[in-house]
Image: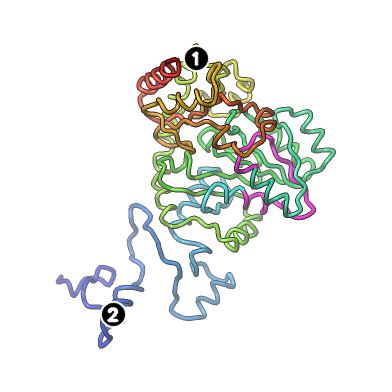
């Protein structure tokens, strides 16, 4: 078969639709708008298109009326994003997923979709990511939502508060940032549902490898895809997963507000997802060994890692999480150290990078009081245990011997 006889989808010759057109018009239209290929690619292609066209206006009208499936405008759906969203719904354990431009956008959207609007009550764990606290305090509250804050580790007090206040929405992190408390999610979900509240859980720190709260009854499960699910430090994104009956409202809010994940980042995150289990498993193994090393080091106190027997929630973590795994995050206090000494220790590290993220293949270290939780008052930091000598570590997949050696030499330099 010669080139001119190739099937249409592989035709590389003159676009006959452009016969007699000017060069300008040919440059704009030639080659575009060909029919979809009959085979499929081994990986999902990157669909960069903003708009999608149909052979007639009736098809477009039927699409917008919900009479047929398809795509119209990228804010309302993109084939690359949809592939990722389906994969996320699968790994989370059900429901329908909408991807967003960031984890913060996902939290904001989920809280709104769950019903936190004017005149309603939102009950929030006092141990949450600093920027999440900011958006609740500076945006959600200003929408007329009554926001209450509580220690979700104290279940008896929490239950009493729920029965007294009857919140409409409850929000918390299962594995908290940065202190690594473990909230008994099934218990809290049951309490919340007993008073008619919707439950929104940010599961970024735990990730679906450790725990899947949607399968335990959470109404909305949120992830910063930037972190463990992507895992390579090169794409920002977020996701919200909910039940089918709640998805249309979630999709409407997400698409009208416009904080939708880009197709290019969706493709990168879908790629990162392929090695998710391999990465997170190695990060968890490394974290166990690094935590044991830190727990016995003379320059360290208050090592926080749920896998340590002396962690206050070790039993809860052992019951909730995947057997033998407790995540890839470690937090500790540098003994008798000032903020400046913590900076010196982090700056001295050769492998651990001083970056404000987590879940990457490389190890990251930061000072929460001056970064992730810098906007909290001194009293708020103290209430959750964040001190001027607290350091948070996101453990990577490097050889553990190299990581331990790196921490050892950094500790030595603090003493100089």
Residue ID for mark 2: 26
Please tell me in which quadrant of the rendered image residue 11 appears: bottom left
Would you say 210 lies left or right of 411 here? Answer: right
| Of labels 2 and 1, the one closer to you | 1
Does label 2 or label 1 sit earlier along the sequence? 2
Counting from the top left corner in percent of width and height, residue 401 is at: 36, 19
Q: Residue furthest left?
A: 2
Q: Are marks 2 and 1 in contact (CB under 8 Å)?
A: no
Above-or-below relation of 345 to 152 = above
Counting from the top left corner in percent of width and height, residue 38 is at: 33, 65
How many neighbours does mark 2 have within 10 angstroms: few (below 14), some (14-19), or many (20 or more)? Answer: some
Please tell me in which quadrant of the rendered image residue 194 appears: top right
Examine the structure image and report whether residue 337 is included in the region drawn in magenta: no
Q: Toward the viewer: 218 or 403? A: 403
The N terminus: image quadrant: bottom left
How many neighbours does mark 1 have within 10 angstroms: few (below 14), some (14-19), or many (20 or more)? Answer: some
Counting from the top left corner in percent of width and height, residue 160 is at: 82, 33
Residue at position x 42%, y 48% in the image: 270
Counting from the top left corner in percent of width and height, residue 280 is at: 45, 33
Residue ID for mark 1: 299
Residue extent of the magenta highlight: 108-133
Above-or-below relation of 332 to 379 = above
Residue at position x 25%, y 88% in the image: 20
Alpha carbon distance from label 2 to label 1: 69 Å
The C terminus: image quadrant: top left
The number of callouts visible is 2
**Label 1: element kind:** loop
**Label 2: element kind:** helix
């Amino acid at each position: 078969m010669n080139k001119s006889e190739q099937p249409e989808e592989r035709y590389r010759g003159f676009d006959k639709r452009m016969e007699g057109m000017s060069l300008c018009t040919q440059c704009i239209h030639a080659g575009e708008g060909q029919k979809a290929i009959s085979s499929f690619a081994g990986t999902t292609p990157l669909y960069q298109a903003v708009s999608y066209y149909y052979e007639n206006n009736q098809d477009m009208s039927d699409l917008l009326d919900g009479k047929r499936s398809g795509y119209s405008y990228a804010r309302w759906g993109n084939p690359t994003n949809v592939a990722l969203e389906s994969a996320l719904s699968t790994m989370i354990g059900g429901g329908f997923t909408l991807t967003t431009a960031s984890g913060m956008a996902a939290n904001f959207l989920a809280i709104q979709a769950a019903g936190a609007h004017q005149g309603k009550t939102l009950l929030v764990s006092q141990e949450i990511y600093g920027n999440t606290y900011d958006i609740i305090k500076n945006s959600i509250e200003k929408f007329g939502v009554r926001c209450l804050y509580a220690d979700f580790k104290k279940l008896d007090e929490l239950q009493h508060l729920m029965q007294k206040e009857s919140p409409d929405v409850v929000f918390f992190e299962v594995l908290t940032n940065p202190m690594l408390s473990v909230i008994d999610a099934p218990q809290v979900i049951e309490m919340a549902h007993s008073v008619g509240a919707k439950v929104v859980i940010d599961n970024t720190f735990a990730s679906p490898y450790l725990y899947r709260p949607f399968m335990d009854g959470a109404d909305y499960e949120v992830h910063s895809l930037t972190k463990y699910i992507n895992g390579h430090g090169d794409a920002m994104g977020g996701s919200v997963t909910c039940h089918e009956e709640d998805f249309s409202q979630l999709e409407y809010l997400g698409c009208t507000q416009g904080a939708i994940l880009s197709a290019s980042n969706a493709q990168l995150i879908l790629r990162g997802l392929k090695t998710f289990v391999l990465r997170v498993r190695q990060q968890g193994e490394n974290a166990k060994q690094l935590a044991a090393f830190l727990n016995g080091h003379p320059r360290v106190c208050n090592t926080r890692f749920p896998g340590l027997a002396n962690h206050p929630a070790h039993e809860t973590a052992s019951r909730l999480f995947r057997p033998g795994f407790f995540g890839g995050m470690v937090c500790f206090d540098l003994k008798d150290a000032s903020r400046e000494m913590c900076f010196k220790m982090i700056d001295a590290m050769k492998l651990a990078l001083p970056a404000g993220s987590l879940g990457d293949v490389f190890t990251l270290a930061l000072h929460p009081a001056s970064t992730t939780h810098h906007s909290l008052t001194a009293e708020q930091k103290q209430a959750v245990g964040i001190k001027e000598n607290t350091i948070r570590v996101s453990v990577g997949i490097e050889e553990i011997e190299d990581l331990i050696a790196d921490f050892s030499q950094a500790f030595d330099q603090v003493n100089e």
